[in-house]
């Protein structure tokens, strides 16, 4: 077989493999998406809002301090490739929508020193909390039945878990979910205005 034919054959095989890999990744991530019942969503939101975890300086932060904002809570680790791929997009979205009331909250299930280095390297512009092995129970309470990373949940201004994503988040899909939520007021403010 001539060199040209070999190059063409290898190129075709590589293109096919990349296409099949992308297709399988999409298929598998959709297969593992979990629809949560209303009760599970409520329990998941309560578990996350009740959490108090140290930030990268070691100071405990209560997640509930951000109630009233649209929260995108992302469970991740420095060793997780899809996590590393999505965080730069989260940084951009935080810049773009932060003043409108969006807050990304990263919960790293990792070693503090590795998270600090990652935080500096990427220039993360949103709160990063560091969880221990016990944080897996928080993931499960929030609907992650597969104990896989990354796992992202969206909590509206009223503290309700409205969406969950297992695997790398598609930023366009996330924006379609978040933008309408940014226009909503928390339920307690809505009830004050109607009284």
Image (cartoon, rainbow, N blue to C red):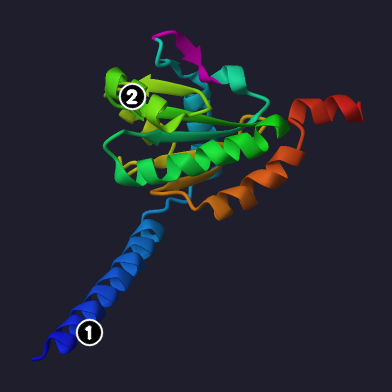
Residue 96: image location, x then y, percent: 65, 39
User: Does residue 124 appear to the left or right of 144 in the view shown?
Assistant: right
- Residue 37 in the image: above or below residue 133: below
Can you tell which quarter of the image residue 150 is in?
top left
Q: Residue at x 86, y 24 (%)?
A: 192
Q: Residue at x 80, y 26 (%)?
A: 189
Residue 59: image location, x then y, percent: 44, 8
Residue 12 can be seen, yes or no:
yes
Location of mark 2 (residue): 117
Can you tell which quarter of the image residue 144 is in?
top left
Residue 85: image location, x then y, percent: 39, 46
Quarter occupied by the N terminus: bottom left
Location of mark 1 (residue): 8
User: Does residue 86 appear to the left or right of 110 in the view shown?
Assistant: right
Q: Work out whether mark 1 precedes mark 2 in sequence or the reverse, and give the earlier one.
A: 1
Of circles 1 and 2, the one toward us is 1
Residue stretch in magenta: 58-63
**Gap in Å between the C-alphas at discs 1 and 2?**
42 Å
Residue 168 image label: none
């Amino acid at each position: 077989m001539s060199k040209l034919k070999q190059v063409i054959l290898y190129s075709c095989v590589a293109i096919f493999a990349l296409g099949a890999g992308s297709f399988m990744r999409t298929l598998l991530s959709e297969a593992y998406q979990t629809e949560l019942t209303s009760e599970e969503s409520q329990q998941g939101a309560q578990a996350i809002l009740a959490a108090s975890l140290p930030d990268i300086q070691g100071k405990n932060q209560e997640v509930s301090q951000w109630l009233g904002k649209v929260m995108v809570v992302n469970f991740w680790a420095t060793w997780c490739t899809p996590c590393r791929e999505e965080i730069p997009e989260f940084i951009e979205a935080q810049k773009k929508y932060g003043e409108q009331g969006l807050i990304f909250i990263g919960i790293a299930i990792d070693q503090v020193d590795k998270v600090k280095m990652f935080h500096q390297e990427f220039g993360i512009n949103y709160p990063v909390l560091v969880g221990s092995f016990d944080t897996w129970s928080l993931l499960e309470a929030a609907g992650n039945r597969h104990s896989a990373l990354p796992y992202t949940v969206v909590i509206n201004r009223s503290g309700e878990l409205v969406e969950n994503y297992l695997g790398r988040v598609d930023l366009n899909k996330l924006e379609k979910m978040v933008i309408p939520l940014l226009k909503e007021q928390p339920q307690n403010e809505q009830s004050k205005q109607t009284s």
